[in-house]
Image: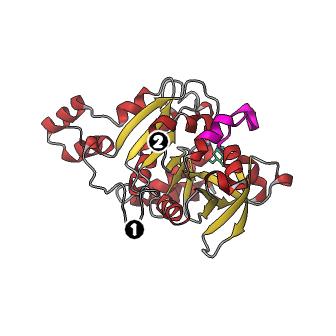
Amino acid sequence: MNRSRRFHAKAPDMVAGMTQSHPRISKAVIPAAGLGTRFLPATKATPKEMLPVVDKPAIQYVVEEAVAAGLDDVLMVTGRNKRPLEDHFDRNYELESALQKKGDASRLAKVQESSDLATMHYVRQGDPKGLGHAVLCAAPHVGDEPFAVLLGDDLIDPRDPLLQRMVEVQEQRGGSVIALMEVAPEQIHLYGCAAVETTEDSDVVQVSGLVEKPDPADAPSNYAIIGRYVLDPSIFDILRRTEPGRGGEIQLTDALQQLAEDEKIGGPVHGVVFKGRRYDTGDRGDYLRAIVRLACEREDLGPDFRTWLRSYVAEEM
Ligand code: G1P
């Protein structure tokens, strides 16, 4: 039996005093339809999400993060040439039986890890019309409940849980919650940017406006959206009406701006300000830095790798 289809003992309607109008968040949406052109030729025949970060595909870290936050229903929004993603989260009986025959229990466990993680679903985006459009493709699966969106290019260190906190804030305050990080002003044009007001919680801000990839001179703050969102389902109706924005694409930031502007549509928009470790795997330099940092911290590889790295750096200086 595929253990990913296991029954999850969870009370859907009444958790810790929550009522039916406030269902527990259980669905995560992971847009994964991008072409990964920054990593060509590696991504000619392999999805960028499958590139290894140390010895695990980048996308597996993201699914693990969703599961750690209690979201074990995962919908991937994919496109052409993304079959390896489905295969990775499915059983591989041939490999499993070969490892079983060899008695290699630890590698067998590694093979089974990804297929046991979550209940996986897939939908194809068809036309790549932007992040907002990718999220809209999730509407039939998500239905009328709040849900999370995790972008695969951002890896959040599991020791600095962010999504758990966002889910908690959404359950307390309703509406939608986005993840924010302060960046250097010259970097803000790479991100969605939020105008914010403080709240009584030091890590939570109220979002009063949003703009996608502003010119630094027009940026309302240096709070950048990093790729984690907990969204009210009213976002779907807004996305259906959202015109293409920056880069000619339907932008999730533009739809969220409408929510931030008018609380009556789908509740407020809050931001959780993240100060933990985040690795960007969407850019080649950052991808390399992520691998080095994570390899250094691994118990099995770290000691040898750090020793080598120290002497390599000393030689280079
Ligand atoms: C997307 C969002 C942007 C956000 C970023 C975070 O942009 O549109 O608002 O700041 O992810 O990684 P992308 O990097 O996909 O162009």
298 to 275, vertically: above or below: above
Q: Mark 2 — residue?
A: 142
Asked if the residue at label 1 sits under 8 Å from ligand 1, the reply is: no
| Residue behind label 2 places its C-beta within 8 angstroms of ligand 1 | no
Does residue 308 appear in this view? no
Q: Report crowding for label 2: few under 14, some 14 to 19, many 20 or more residues within 10 A (C-alpha).
A: many
Indicate the position of residue 70 as horizontal and vertical percent values: 39, 56
If the image is split into quadrants, where does the N terminus sit?
top left
On residue 220, which mark appears? none
The label nearer to you, 1 versus 2, is 1
Ligand 1 visible in quadrant = top right
Residue position marked by numbered label 1 in the rendering:
17
Q: Determine the secondary structure under disc 2.
A: helix
Left or right of 145, for residue 70? left
Magenta part of the chain: 237-252
Question: Please, what is the three-letter code of the amino acid marked with disc 1?
Answer: Gly
Q: Residues within 10 Å of mark 1 (few under 14, many from 20)?
A: few
Q: Position of residue 82 (x, y in %)?
A: 46, 28
Residue 114 part of the magenta-drawn span:
no
**Residue displayed at 36% across by 61% down:** 14
| Pointer 1 or 2: first along the chain | 1
Q: Is residue 109 above or below residue 173?
A: above
Quadrant of residue 284 in the image? top right
- Amino acid type at circle 2 is Val
Q: Position of residue 95 (x, y in %)?
A: 24, 32
Residue at image point 61% right, 68% down: 204
Residue 89 is drawn in which quadrant? top left
Q: Who's the residue at 57% across and 32% down the image? A: 34
Question: Looking at the picture, does residue 189 appear above or below residue 43?
Answer: below
Front one among 66 and 205: 205
